[in-house]
């Protein structure tokens, strides 16, 4: 069971790392299929892919300009531009050398772009874990202090109850003995018991 969970955890952690290579490989495969179906040496298809690639690059540049620039949109646009360029070259070329070279370059660029995002995510995850651990330790400390305080209050209450019970027992026992003086108790500031009132009558 633990081995299965470990395997799943490893796959979940490795999947994002493999995503750029899977994406560029998929584009390369589709482009070579396109090449075999009439795109080889097709100027029109190459011009179309070049235009789309340049358009995506311009969109990425515009999205990243200024303070209001959106990094996610810019990254997506640049990735689309690279994928279109790779598809255009792989679809137009008649051999594997140039498509493979473009695939290697595109994969390297994709990993370079995503590495920054991974580092940012990792720093955020570490900061969150540290903050969570600090909050957990703080709550645990508060709980320990409250538990100690509650325990002390319970002990004080128990001691007070035991003292009151002992005092009441002693006074009741003393009240039935000869020579008991309730006025002496009143002068001492001790509480008057019902038994005392009965003796006064």
Image: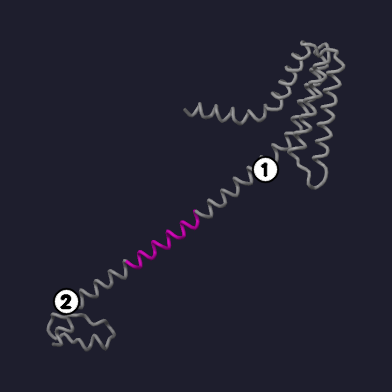
Label drawn at residue 157: none
Residue to which mark 2 is pinned: 173
Above or below: residue 31 compared with residue 120: above
* Along the viewing direction, whichever of 158 and 25 lies nearer the viewer: 25
Of the residues under marks 1 and 2, which one precedes in the sequence? 1
- Say whether residue 29 is left or right of residue 48: left
Q: Is residue 110 above or below residue 144?
A: above
In the figure, is residue 120 to the left or right of 100?
A: left
Residue 179 in percent (x, y) is at 14, 86
- Residue at the image position 51 percent from the left and 29 percent from the top: 5
- Give residue 63's position: percent from left, percent from top: 80, 40
* Lateral position of residue 163 relative to residue 22, left or right: left
Q: Position of residue 121 (x, y in %)?
A: 67, 40
Q: Secondary structure at mark 1?
A: helix
Residue 70 appears left or right of 165 = right
- Residue 153 lies, with reference to residue 61, above or below; the image says below
Is residue 149 found inside the magenta-colored segment of the image? yes
Residue at image position (78%, 22%) is 104
Residue 121's place in the image compared with 42, above or below, is below
Q: Which x, y percent locates residue 176?
A: 13, 80
Q: Is residue 33 magenta?
A: no
How crowded is the residue under tag 2: few (<14 C-alpha within 10 Å), some, or many (20+)?
few
**Quadrant in which the C terminus appears:** bottom left
Q: Write the start and end of the magenta stretch as one range.
A: 140-157
Residue underneath mark 1: 123
Q: Nearer the viewer, residue 196 or 169?
A: 196
Residue shown at 25% from the left, 87% from the top:
186
Q: Label 1 crowding class (10 Å Cα cut-off): few <14, some 14-19, many 20+?
A: few
Q: Main secondary structure of the magenta part?
A: helix
* Quarter holding residue 97: top right
């Amino acid at each position: 069971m633990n081995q299965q969970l470990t395997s799943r955890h490893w796959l979940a952690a490795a999947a994002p790392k493999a995503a750029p290579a899977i994406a560029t490989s998929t584009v390369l495969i589709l482009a070579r299929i396109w090449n075999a179906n009439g795109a080889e040496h097709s100027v029109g298809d190459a011009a179309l892919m070049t235009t789309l690639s340049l358009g995506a690059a311009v969109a990425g540049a515009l999205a990243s300009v200024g303070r209001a620039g959106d990094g996610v949109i810019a990254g997506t646009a640049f990735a689309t531009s690279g994928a279109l360029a790779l598809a255009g070259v792989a679809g137009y070329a008649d051999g594997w050398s140039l498509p493979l070279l473009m695939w290697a370059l595109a994969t390297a660029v994709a990993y370079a772009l995503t590495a920054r995002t991974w580092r940012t995510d990792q720093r955020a995850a570490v900061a969150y874990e540290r903050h969570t651990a600090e909050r957990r330790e703080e709550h645990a400390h508060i709980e320990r202090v409250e538990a100690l305080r509650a325990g002390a209050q319970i002990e004080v209450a128990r001691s007070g109850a035991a003292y009151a019970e002992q005092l009441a027992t002693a006074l009741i026992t003393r009240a039935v003995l000869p020579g008991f003086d309730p006025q002496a108790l009143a002068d001492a500031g001790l509480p008057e018991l019902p038994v005392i009132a009965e003796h006064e009558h």
